[in-house]
Amino acid sequence: MQRFFPLALLVVSSILFAQTELAYLKKSDDQALIQTTLQPSSIIGLSERDTYILVASLEEGSLQLFENSNGTLIPKLEFPMSIGKEGFGKEIEGDKKTPVGVYRITSFLNDEQLDDFYGRAAYPLNYPNAWDLLQNRTGSGIWLHAMPEGVTSRPALDSDGCIVINNEQIEMLSPYLDVGRTRIVLTDKSDWLPTEQIQIQREELESHIKNWQEAWESLQDQPYLAFYSDDYNNLKHDKASWDKYKKRVNGSKKFIDVNISDLAIFSYPGADNIVMTEFYQSYVSNNYRSKGWKKQLWKKEGDSWKIIYEAGG
């Protein structure tokens, strides 16, 4: 016997199916939109060679790997993590807190080099960095590492300050980590900004860096040294001794040529109006030449940015 469904039932079924499909498509579109229009606020710009970067949202307990795709950061992996027993905001050695800041992975230790406590892999970080030293922060031995065999999770607050994920997760992460280059941003809170707003910040700061470079090359002391804050301190020179040193050095030059590449810019987490820049610098003058990495810390003072720290390495 042939059966017929009421027309109303067919209409309702069609509407429900259409609504479900639209909701799925909207969710997919929203995810794509978030990935392309919102970016982590701490990362203002990366070099093309910075293929991947880690962001640890300490408040949320989340570790994310982002891929740098032509300046747009695309989420690739995300894991729950464990941090210091006393939370974050490390200040002194032994406080069992995870630091807030921007760090590089400095080395790799495999399971044969590690006690079982650290799992199959560990990646030491360069804590304390320049900003930490300027803040008189102490301590050492901050790592990204795994867990003992057979352990797949730990409480959110359970380390002595390290970032901890399990063995399977660190093995998934390892192919994307470039020792000596990959950075990890340890941020106190997860903030996102529209890509267009970050682009404006990047262009403003790139302009300041370009102007600083040209002032240096001009061999004119006043416009060059005006880029440095009265609070300047590179752990060797304060502003007065820096001015004296640079006037002496630049006074011996007939020309200076500076080339900057691999520029990365970060809005420093946990600090107000502080930006960290890192770039590869090629310097040539009539009597000296050098190549190497340089780091600067810039501070917003009124309507302008001033350098408060500068050093190689």
Image (cartoon, rainbow, N blue to C red):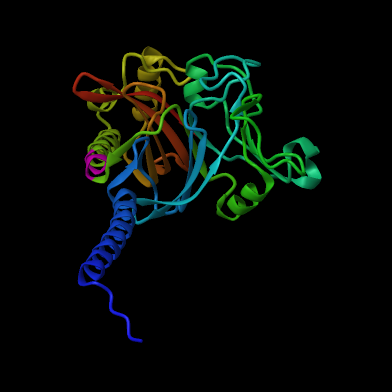
Image location of residue 276, percent across then percent down = 39, 31
Picture quadrant of residue 268 = top left
- In this view, the residue in front, 120 or 251, is 120
Asked if 210 appears above or below 159 in the picture, the reply is: below
Q: Quadrant of the N terminus?
A: bottom left
Give the left or right position of residue 295, taking residue 152 as reference. left
Give the left or right position of residue 269, taking residue 127 as reference. left
Q: Is residue 82 magenta?
A: no
Q: Residue at 49% across / 44% down in the picture? A: 64
Image location of residue 191, percent across then percent down = 35, 33
Region of the chain picked out in magenta, as a range: 196-200
Extreme residue toward the front, this view: 1
Q: Most prominent secondary structure in the magenta stretch?
A: helix
Image location of residue 137, percent across then percent down = 54, 16
Q: Residue at 63% across / 30% down in the picture? A: 155
- In this view, the residue in front, 284 or 188, is 188
